Structures are given as structure tokens and as C-alpha cells.
Image (spheres, rainbow, N blue to C red):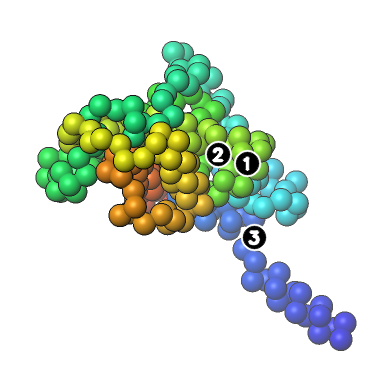
């Protein structure tokens, strides 16, 4: 029995990727973090290179005591913050925004026009530029939470562990960051005069909270579309557009220089 268990454990360990292999597998996600956080390819490459080298040198101390994603993205977060400290003029705090844009905005996003224009007047490249500009104007702590969750694709819990925060703190930062970015994206989308609200302000706020929590979980929105007023649907459409665009930041193969560096690890 002991021999059988020992052999089984050896086979299980053999199937697990080594730390070096795991680092290489995360390179593309790290590059996407760099593009989302830094906005330019040169700085993104620097971020990946420094993160990978730090992780490679420290891998002997890792010893599997934590999830490798948590460990690696904790290093990446520190590198991000160090890189941002070299720059001046970054926003120090989040400007206040209305917690209920469905009620507050006089001009709402025209959902039908948006559906038509996504392949016509509103180009994805233009929206991507608006998105990256909006991300760049978030305070660092909000930007980093958003980039790890929405661009790298970490869960709220893994993002919290990587940043050394409570999950609820990460959720708060995510929710506020999404709403700031949504507001900036909406300025470039087809608009029309807002219709009369169908519900009380409290109901709209609760629906928005439910939408945010669904995005946190990566789950479908639990309320049927026909039960949501047009104003709320317009807000949710821009949140969905933001989420979809974030998932495409930094897509594509790594630059050759990074591929060469990673191959040497």
C-alpha cells in the first residue's frame, strides 16, 4: 500500500508544471497587465522582464507555499507601483461620481444605435483608445485592481491576495473604477435623451450593484432584460462593452525580445 501511494504521488508530482514552466505560461498575461497598466509596449516589456527576472531569482524561496499566480502577480503589482512612482502628474485620488448614472444622466446611451455602430461609426480601435486613456487616468490602486481582475483575468479573491487586500476592498475599487471608465466610454457612444425612469432610484442602485457583482463573478446578470428599464439597460450595455474591451487588451503574440528572454529561463 505504501509503495503504491508513493508511486502515485511521484506520478502526480511529475504531472505538475515546474515553477519555471509556470512562469513561462504566465508571460502573455503579464504582458497584458503591462499594456493595461502602462499603456505602451516599451514599459509593458520592461514590466514583464523585471517581474519574470525577480520571480526567476526568487523561485527557490517559493517552495509552493502559495498559489503561483498569487505569488507572481504580487511581484508584478510591486513592479507596477515602482514604475508608476517614476512618473509625475498621476491622479492621487478618485474623483467622486454619481452612484446611479441611470438617474443622473440626461443623455443616455442609445443601445440600438450602439449595436448598429459597433461595426460602423464607432470603431473598436477608437473605443480601445478611449478605454486605455480612461484606465490611465485612474489612481494607481484602482487601476491595479482593475487590470489584474479585468485584463489578467484573476478572480476577485486572487486579486485581493496578490495585492494584500480584503476581497471587499478590491470589489469597492473595481466598482468605482468601472463606473469611471464607463462614464468616459459613454462620451464617445451614440446618445439620445433619457426616457422617464420606471423605478425608484433605490431600485436602480440595487440593479447596478447586482450587475457589478455579476461582473465580479464572471457570471450572467441574474435579472431578465425585459424587466430592466431602458435607462439601466443603457448603463449595463456600456459596462459590458468595457468588460469586453478589457478582455482584448494586449492580445496577440509576445514581442520577439520577450519570447527570447522567456525561452532562456
Q: Residue at x 61, y 39 (%)?
A: 168
Q: Which residue is mark 2?
A: 171
Does label 3 or label 2 sit earlier along the sequence?
3
The front one of 126 and 84 is 126
Question: What separation in Å lies between label 3 and label 2 (alpha carbons)?
Answer: 32 Å
Residue lying at 23% horizontally and 36% vertically, measured from the top left: 195
The single residue placed furthest to the right in the displayed view is: 2
- Seen at 36% across and 57% down, the residue is 224
Left or right of residue 70, residue 225 in this image: left
Q: 116 or 199, which is in the foreground?
A: 199
Secondary-structure class at tag 1: helix
**Front residue of 226 and 86:** 226
Residue 191: percent from left, percent from top: 19, 34
Q: Quadrant of the N terminus?
A: bottom right
Residue 171 in view in this figure:
yes
Q: Position of residue 115 (x, y in %)?
A: 19, 48
Gap in angstroms between the C-alphas marked 1 and 3: 29 Å
Q: Is residue 158 toward the left or the right of residue 252 in the image?
A: right
Q: Give x and y (percent) for residue 21.
A: 58, 58
Provide residue 256's location: percent of width, then percent of height.
Answer: 38, 47
Earlier in the chain: of badge 1 and badge 3, it is 3
Residue that badge 3 annotates? 18
Mark 1 and 2 residues: CB-CB less than 8 Å, in contact? Answer: yes
Q: Secondary structure at mark 3?
A: loop
Q: Nearer the viewer, residue 63 or 130?
A: 130
Which residue lies under the disc numbered 1? 167
Amino acid at each position: 500500500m505504501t509503495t503504491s501511494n508513493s508511486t502515485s504521488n511521484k506520478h502526480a508530482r511529475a504531472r505538475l508544471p515546474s515553477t519555471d514552466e509556470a512562469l513561462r505560461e504566465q508571460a502573455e498575461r503579464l504582458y497584458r497587465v503591462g499594456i493595461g497598466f502602462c499603456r505602451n509596449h516599451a514599459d509593458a516589456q520592461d514590466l514583464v522582464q523585471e517581474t519574470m527576472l525577480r520571480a526567476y531569482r526568487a523561485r527557490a524561496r517559493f517552495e509552493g507555499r502559495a498559489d503561483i499566480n498569487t505569488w507572481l502577480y504580487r511581484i508584478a503589482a510591486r513592479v507596477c507601483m515602482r514604475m508608476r512612482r517614476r512618473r509625475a502628474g498621476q491622479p492621487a485620488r478618485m474623483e467622486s461620481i454619481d452612484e446611479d448614472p441611470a438617474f443622473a444622466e440626461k443623455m443616455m446611451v442609445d443601445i440600438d444605435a450602439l449595436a448598429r455602430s459597433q461595426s460602423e461609426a464607432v470603431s473598436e480601435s477608437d473605443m480601445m483608445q478611449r478605454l486605455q486613456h480612461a484606465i490611465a487616468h485612474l489612481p494607481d490602486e484602482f487601476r491595479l485592481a482593475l487590470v489584474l481582475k479585468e485584463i489578467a483575468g484573476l478572480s476577485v479573491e486572487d486579486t485581493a491576495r496578490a495585492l494584500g487586500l480584503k476581497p471587499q476592498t478590491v470589489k469597492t475599487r473595481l466598482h468605482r473604477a468601472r463606473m469611471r471608465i464607463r462614464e468616459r466610454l459613454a462620451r464617445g457612444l451614440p446618445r439620445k435623451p433619457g426616457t422617464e425612469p420606471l423605478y425608484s432610484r433605490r431600485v436602480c442602485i440595487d440593479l447596478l450593484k447586482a450587475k457589478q457583482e455579476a461582473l465580479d463573478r464572471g457570471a450572467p446578470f441574474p435579472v431578465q432584460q425585459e424587466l430592466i428599464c431602458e435607462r439601466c439597460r443603457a448603463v449595463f450595455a456600456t459596462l459590458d462593452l468595457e468588460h469586453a474591451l478589457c478582455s482584448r487588451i494586449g492580445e496577440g503574440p509576445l514581442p520577439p525580445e520577450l519570447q527570447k528572454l522567456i525561452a532562456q529561463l
